[in-house]
Image: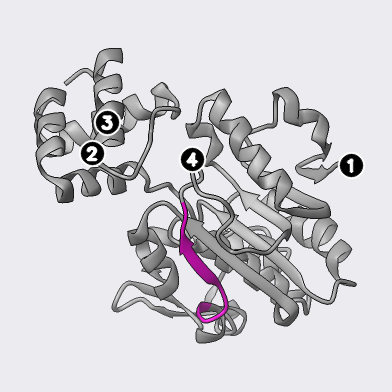
């Protein structure tokens, strides 16, 4: 079930010609890896996959959703979240309204992480939180704010490191801190975010490849981690243009730890690790 270059081109053309989506500027490396996994799961080859996609719109939609599920967790990369908490958010505290956008929000753990840190800084009430993703299934999960406990126990370690300045060795004695933000039900294997968090964000389905900013506001902070790594250089620059034009003056962009701004847009942001601040015009 090896996926080669012609297979990827055939897949890209099939998606473009038979749906609203466009993967023609996605990284071949990431597409090859994800398509290989899908073929193994379905036990078919690329020819059978593309034929079925051309003739079954619902099947095609399902394949797109499989391709666009990204890994996320609460307080992923705790050291980054400490810098958000200590170095970035205090610079926004004098604003009357803070607006934050999470494009590619996936199942929402990053959005909830941000809201917890904002609450600890007494900034959540005056913050507007926006999340978007290409995949409507993950947006539904983000709205519900319910996750598997046993699969995500590292959440508690990350919470301890970021919120309590701990060492990542949480104990049930810290339950009073967790209870402010989420409920843990080990019997039913569930972590559920509290209602005041779940009701806060505004979510929209949004395709960074072709859609404008559908929220119609400008942002003080855009957090887009581990998304552009799936795009080729041309598409990355298009997305950087979208972000740059929708950041407020002195607004900030945060990318993933393995992502960076190269090319023409590197001069339009000032990097102060790990943040990219919009350069003065």
Q: Which residue is mark 3?
A: 35
| The C terminus sits in image quarter | top right
Q: Which residue is mark 2?
A: 18
Q: Which residue is mark 4?
A: 209
Crowd band around label 1 with a 10 angstrom C-alpha radius: few (<14), some (14–19), many (20+): few
Whether residue 196 is visible to the viewer of this picture, yes or no, is yes
What separation in Å lies between label 3 and label 1 (alpha carbons)?
42 Å
What separation in Å lies between label 4 and label 1 (alpha carbons)?
25 Å
Q: Earlier in the sequence, mark 2 or mark 1?
A: 2
Query: Of residues 153 and 59, which is closer to you in this image?
Result: 59
Magenta span: 198-206
Residue at point 76%, 76% (across, down) = 123
Q: Earlier in the sequence, mark 2 or mark 3?
A: 2
Q: Quadrant of residue 157?
A: bottom right
Q: Quadrant of residue 41?
A: top left
Residue at point 60%, 48% (across, down) = 224
């Amino acid at each position: 079930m090896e996926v080669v270059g012609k297979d990827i081109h055939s897949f890209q053309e099939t998606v473009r010609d038979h749906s609203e989506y466009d993967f023609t500027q996605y990284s071949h490396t990431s597409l090859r890896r994800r398509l290989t996994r899908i073929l193994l799961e379905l036990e078919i080859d690329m020819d059978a996959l593309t034929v079925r996609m051309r003739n079954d719109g619902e099947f095609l939609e399902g394949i797109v959703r499989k391709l666009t599920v990204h890994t996320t967790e609460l307080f992923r990369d705790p050291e980054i979240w400490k810098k958000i908490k200590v170095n970035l958010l205090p610079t926004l505290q004098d604003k009357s309204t803070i607006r934050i956008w999470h494009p590619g929000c996936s199942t929402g753990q990053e959005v909830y992480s941000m809201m917890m840190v904002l609450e600890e800084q007494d900034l959540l009430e005056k913050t507007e939180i926006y999340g978007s993703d290409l995949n409507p299934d993950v947006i539904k999960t983000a709205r519900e704010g319910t996750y598997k406990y046993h699969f995500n126990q590292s959440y508690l370690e990350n919470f301890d490191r970021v919120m309590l300045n701990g060492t990542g060795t949480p104990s049930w004695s810290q339950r009073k801190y967790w209870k402010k933000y989420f409920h843990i039900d080990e019997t039913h294997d569930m972590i559920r975010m509290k209602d005041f968090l779940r009701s806060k964000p505004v979510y929209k389905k949004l395709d960074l490849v072709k859609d404008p900013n559908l929220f119609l506001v400008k942002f003080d902070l855009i957090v887009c981690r581990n998304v552009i790594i799936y795009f080729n250089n041309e598409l990355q620059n298009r997305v950087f243009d979208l972000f740059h034009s929708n950041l407020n003056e002195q607004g900030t962009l945060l990318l993933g730890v393995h992502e960076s701004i190269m090319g023409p847009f590197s001069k339009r942001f000032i990097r102060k690790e790990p943040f990219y601040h919009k350069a003065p015009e």
